[in-house]
Amino acid sequence: MFHELTIRDVRPETAGAVAITFDVPDAAAADFAWQPGQYLTLRDTVDGQDVRRSYSIASLPGKPLTVGVKRLEGGVFSPHCQGLKPGDSLQVMPPEGRFTPRGEDRLVLIASGSGITPIVSIAADALARGAEVTLIYGNRSHDTIMFRDTLDGLKDRYLDRFTLIHILSRETQDVALLNGRITGDKIGPGPCRCGRSGRRRGHLFVRPWRHDRRCCRHAGGAGHRARAVAYRALLSGR
Ligand SMILES: Cc1cc2nc3c(=O)[nH]c(=O)nc-3n(C[C@H](O)[C@H](O)[C@H](O)COP(=O)(O)OP(=O)(O)OC[C@H]3O[C@@H](n4cnc5c(N)ncnc54)[C@H](O)[C@@H]3O)c2cc1C
């Protein structure tokens, strides 16, 4: 059942993406208890049409309910979201999804673009409970990195247990391995270690789906237990 939630905050993340934070009234708090990795279905009337789309929860543990929406050129709902303001409201379905960690103590996370939204929540939650986390995050350039401040904050706070690797496809970095797209050599046994301990076995979460097959193959070679959930599979449930 949809609930009408008021928007508390809309923060630009990049030139083409916003983070939207909702107020959840006490009466709905139990319905909106969420686990890292879950998503919300948002609904609104856009140009006279009833439109629903799913967005992953990007909230950190104990923080207000937030999603990150990246504008898709030619899309209906994601451009509409860029113009939302605090005080506006949206119809929101309670959290759904099984792309959730199960208390693993070593995680290797791979994301690109807006695929970071569930991953930032998974990383923050795992770090808060003492896990070692490596995040490999692909983007075109530094200015398209979503949740950059949040990720930098986690890096500063969990220096010993959080390894953050940015791979950029349209901006040159000093280390050649960090340039281009996320490929097997970038996530093989060398760079793809768990946190600072460098232990090789960990649990792998990958977003979005186009990374799944090749990431899992290489991660399998590196000793990680892959648990990738495909956007493709999730999309079919929309
Ligand atoms: C579980 C889940 C979680 C997700 N999490 C996130 C998230 O955290 N952040 C995020 O940004 N996105 C996320 N998404 C994607 C999101 O749900 C939307 O699909 C996305 O925002 C695009 O919606 P839209 O209405 O803007 O685009 P749509 O209107 O659905 O259009 C999508 C694309 O299709 C093209 N198109 C539309 N109609 C036609 C047509 N008739 N012919 C040809 N082409 C057409 C458009 O040009 C556009 O490029 C998630 C999806 C799922 C399933």
Image: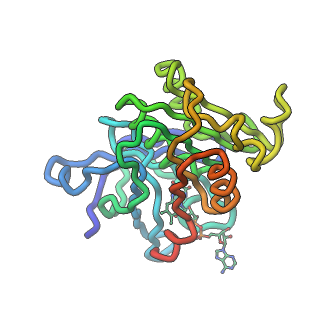
What residue occupies the far left of the structure in this picture? 27
Point 64% across, 49% down: residue: 219
Point 52% across, 42% down: residue: 202
**Quadrant for the N terminus in the image:** bottom left
Image coordinates of residue 188 in percent, x first then y, are 71, 43
How many labels, in total? Answer: 0
Image coordinates of residue 28 in percent, x first then y, are 19, 54
Point 82% across, 38% down: residue: 179
Point 42% across, 66% down: residue: 44
Colour scheme shown: rainbow
- The quarter of the rendering in which ligand 1 is drawn is bottom right
- The residue lying toward the viewer, choosing from 193 and 41, is 193
Q: In the picture shown, does residue 108 fall above or below 127?
A: below
Q: In the picture shown, does residue 4 fall above or below 123?
A: below
- The residue lying toward the viewer, choosing from 112 and 213, is 213
Q: Quadrant of residue 197?
A: top right
Q: Is residue 6 left or right of residue 198?
A: left
- The residue lying toward the viewer, choosing from 166 and 146, is 166
Image coordinates of residue 176 in percent, x first then y, are 85, 33
Image coordinates of residue 195 in percent, x first then y, are 55, 29
